[in-house]
Amino acid sequence: MKGLIKKDFLILKRSSKMILFLLVIYFICSIDANGMESSILPFMMAVLCNSTFSYDEYNKWDPYAMTLPGKKNTVIAAKYAMTLVVMMIAFVFTVVISYIMGTVRGDYSLGISFQDGLLGVSLGILAIAIIFPLIIKFGLEKGRIAIMIGSIGLAAFFMIVGSIIEVPKNVAGFLEVYLVYLLPLLAMTLLIGSYFLSTKIYSKKEF
């Protein structure tokens, strides 16, 4: 599996200019960030990891991978493992840059910077948990369409529910304090389910 992970990192290396661009955008957003702007880096990196599927599809990697020794789910496990490593690196960058910029402004603490990192990583992991099975099931192009339709539908659902249901103040207060710590647990739970779903889908595919 190490070879598969290395292969995906070599693909990401080809996107080094895009990664540098994202870092610049993140740095600019962090200069005067007061909320989710400072947490966006892990999410952007998670989306960028989808480019590995594009290269695999273009170079017809999957049929070749099936000739390699090992189980089919090793290919999927390598995708998830590589993306989690990227998430951890992005988390460190988020905490460090958030703390530095907050210190310069005089309105941040290490605890807030850590929360920014947790929020960003959670959003990134949630994105992976949703996107990966769709791409594996439908392919990159159809997967993107499914993601777009699903995102619009989900946003519309939350807008409608939010306009109909009023969240009690005690629940809102609880979420405001603890959501940043509950979200990573939810994200990891969904990621585990996403992994097993992806391996099931991949094992039934014929190349």
Image (cartoon, grey):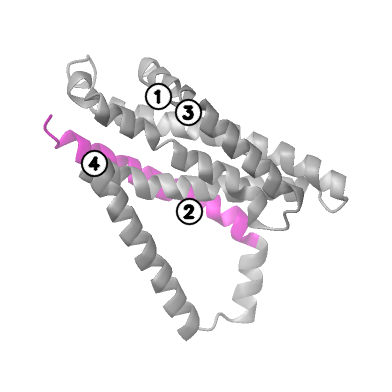
Give neighbour class at mark 2: few <14, some 14-19, many 20+ (Cα, 10 Å).
Answer: some
Q: Residue 140, image x and y in percent?
A: 28, 41
Check the image and report above or below for 189 versus 75. below
Amino acid type at circle 3 is: Ser
**SS at mark 3?**
loop
Q: Residues within 10 Å of mark 4 (few under 14, many from 20)?
A: some
**Does residue 155 show up magenta in the picture?**
no
Contact, mark 4 vs mark 2 (Cβ under 8 Å): no
Kind of residue at badge 1: Asp
* Mark 1 or 3: the one toward you: 3
Q: Disc 1 and disc 4: Cα gap in Å?
A: 17 Å
Secondary structure at numbered mark 2:
helix
**What segment carries the magenta color?**
178-207
Judged by depth in the image, the label closer to the viewer, 3 or 2, is: 3
Question: Which residue bears the numbered disc 2?
Answer: 186
Disc 1/disc 3 C-alpha distance (Å): 11 Å
Question: Does residue 108 appear anywhere in the picture?
Answer: yes
Which tag, 2 or 1, sits closer to the chain's start? Answer: 1
Q: Earlier in the sequence, mark 4 or mark 2?
A: 4
| Res 206 → quadrant | top left
Nearest the viewer among 138 and 82 is 138
Horizontally, residue 22 falls left or right of residue 188, namely: right
- Callout 1 environment at 10 Å: few (<14), some (14 to 19), or many (20+)? many
Residue 8: assigned label: 1
Which residue has dot 3 on it?
Answer: 15
Q: Position of residue 102 (x, y in %)?
A: 81, 47
Which circle, 4 or 3, is nearer the viewer? 3
Image point (59%, 43%), residue name: 41
Q: Residue beneath label 4, please?
A: 139
Q: Nearer the viewer, residue 119 or 142?
A: 142
Quadrant where the N terminus sits is top left
Q: Residue furthest left?
A: 206
